[in-house]
């Protein structure tokens, strides 16, 4: 009896391993393509001011490009990647997440709930930007789907929870995590009580801002895709509250962003994302977003953009450079302030991000068929952006987070 169970179990493991290997070998070339660094924004702006479904009957993106309002109906039931050897894997490929990023005079961080198809989790990291000697804190909690205490709602538009968390285990240090949206206002509540840090947030954030919304194909037939909405310059209302280590932090010193993403992507994937919130020298709310990854050369557009008082300005071409490799403190420069863009009256930026802290608490695992690395850096922005009307916005105080992620999942 035991011998039969062992043989059957070994057979199942062998079959799953073969499927995993085939999918990995077949799809890894999607990730190895070069990232897009230049685009023609006019050709990729989706100008239709009407709601449309994300996917067609073949599971491919209906439209590809970027827009400034979330007009997309997420009909994820149409998902069926053409590259999959194993159709039941399709819904396990569907990833969804919601995140709140924050920065203040001292603290920078992010709280996210995510669903990877086969499991869910919570990501939380925070650092004191003014005191690098205070060790940054990071945590990832992961749960198998059948045991998950967290739900990410992918159809939520109004009067509903984007993230709903119900504590099921006394071993979890999260006491609460809920993200609710109603009539243009986000209610965000989180409570983490650990031995290293205690953080509680009870926020009401105005969501009446212009986002950057992107619909990126990853595969040639667009059945692998990345859909994302990013909101910056979210204003906390008076009743909002933030406490760190039982000390109440003035809410007026905080700036917030909201990231809501969905996607179906190759087994091996990765990204670089830089996000920042702050103020300009003339007191305007400032946000900056730059990201690459999940991109097939077919796309030819990016999510690079800046935000002033909640209005989004798309950057059509931006050159990014860094002076040191991953794993070290380094600078990033973002520049498209040249005669070509100036002649076209395009939005442009000349910005430097200087990393002050690197979070070394996050796992870095690199094996032949099991790759997982996630690095977070925290730093400060300097420089300026200019809009198409030649208004110049000089950064006075803005802090940001850089995420570098690679994984096989």
Image (cartoon, rainbow, N blue to C red):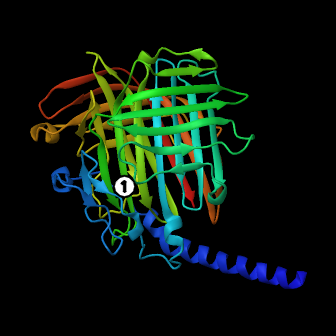
Quarter assignment of residue 334: top left
Residue that numbered label 1 is attached to:
227
Q: Where is residue 372 in the image (x, y as percent from the top left)?
A: 60, 54
Instruction: Name, please, the residue furthest toward the front.
Output: 159
- Residue 337 against residue 145 in the figure, above or below: above
Specify the quadrant that holds the C terminus: bottom right
Decide if residue 74 is on the left or right side of residue 404. left
* Looking at the image, residue 14 lies above or below residue 213: below
Residue at figure coordinates x 37%, y 38% from the top left: 182
Measured as percent of width and height from the top left, residue 300 is found at 27, 57
51 relative to 96 in the view: left or right = left
Seen in the picture, residue 341 relative to 237 is either above or below; the reply is below
Q: Foreground residue, 268 or 54?
A: 54
Q: Does dot 1 land on a helix, a strand or a loop? A: strand
Left or right of 52, for residue 235: right
The count of marks equals: 1
Q: Can residue 365 be seen in this view?
A: no
Quadrant assignment, res 281:
top left
The 10 Å Cα crowd at callout 1, few under 14, some 14 to 19, many 20 or more, is many
The structure residue drawn at horizontal position 16% and vertical position 56%, both measured from the top left corner, is 43
Given residues 176 and 354, the one toward you in this image is 176
Q: Does residue 225 appear in the picture of this structure?
A: yes
Q: Residue at x 33, y 58 (%)?
A: 216
Which is nearer the eye, 384 or 335? Answer: 384
Measured from the top left, where is residue 345 in percent x and y?
A: 11, 38
Quarter occupied by the N terminus: bottom right
- The quarter holding residue 193 reads top right
Front residue of 58/41: it is 58
Give the left or right position of residue 364, taking residue 106 as reference.
right
Q: Position of residue 297 (x, y in %)?
A: 32, 62
């Amino acid at each position: 009896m035991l011998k039969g169970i062992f043989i059957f179990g070994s057979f199942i493991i062998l079959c799953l391993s073969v499927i995993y290997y085939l999918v990995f070998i077949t799809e890894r070339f999607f990730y190895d393509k070069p990232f897009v660094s230049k685009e023609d924004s006019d050709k990729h702006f989706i100008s239709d001011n009407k709601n449309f479904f994300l996917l067609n009957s073949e599971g491919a993106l209906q439209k590809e490009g970027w827009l400034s309002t979330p007009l997309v109906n997420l009909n994820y039931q149409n998902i069926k990647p053409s590259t999959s050897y194993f159709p039941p894997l399709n819904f396990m490929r569907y990833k969804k997440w919601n995140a709140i990023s924050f920065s203040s005079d001292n603290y920078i961080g992010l709280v996210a709930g995510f669903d990877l198809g086969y499991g869910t989790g919570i990501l939380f990291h925070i650092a004191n930007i003014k005191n690098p000697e205070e060790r940054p804190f990071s945590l990832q909690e992961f749960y198998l789907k059948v045991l998950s205490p967290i739900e990410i709602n992918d159809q939520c538009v109004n009067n509903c929870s984007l993230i709903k968390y119900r504590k099921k285990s006394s071993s979890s240090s999260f006491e609460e995590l809920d993200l609710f949206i109603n009539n243009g206002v986000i209610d965000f509540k989180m409570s983490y009580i650990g031995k290293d840090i205690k953080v509680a947030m009870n926020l009401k954030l105005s969501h009446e801002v212009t986002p950057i919304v992107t619909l990126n194909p990853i595969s040639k037939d667009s059945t692998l895709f990345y859909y994302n909405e990013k909101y910056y310059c979210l204003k906390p209302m008076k009743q909002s509250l933030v406490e760190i280590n039982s000390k109440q932090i003035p809410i007026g010193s905080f700036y917030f962003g909201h990231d809501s993403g969905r996607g179906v992507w190759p087994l091996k994937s990765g990204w670089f994302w830089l996000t920042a919130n702050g103020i300009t020298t003339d007191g305007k709310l400032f946000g900056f977003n730059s990201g690459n990854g999940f991109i097939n050369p077919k796309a030819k557009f990016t999510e690079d953009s800046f935000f002033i008082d909640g209005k989004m300005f798309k950057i059509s071409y931006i050159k990014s450079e860094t002076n040191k490799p991953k794993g070290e403190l380094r600078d990033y420069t973002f520049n498209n302030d040249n005669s070509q863009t100036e002649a076209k009256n395009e939005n442009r930026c000349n910005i430097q991000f200087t990393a002050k802290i690197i979070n070394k608490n996050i796992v870095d695992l690199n094996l032949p068929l099991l790759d997982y690395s996630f690095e977070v850096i925290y730093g400060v922005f300097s420089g300026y952006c200019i809009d198409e009307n030649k208004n110049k916005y000089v950064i006075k105080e803005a802090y940001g987070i850089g995420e570098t992620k690679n994984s096989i999942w």
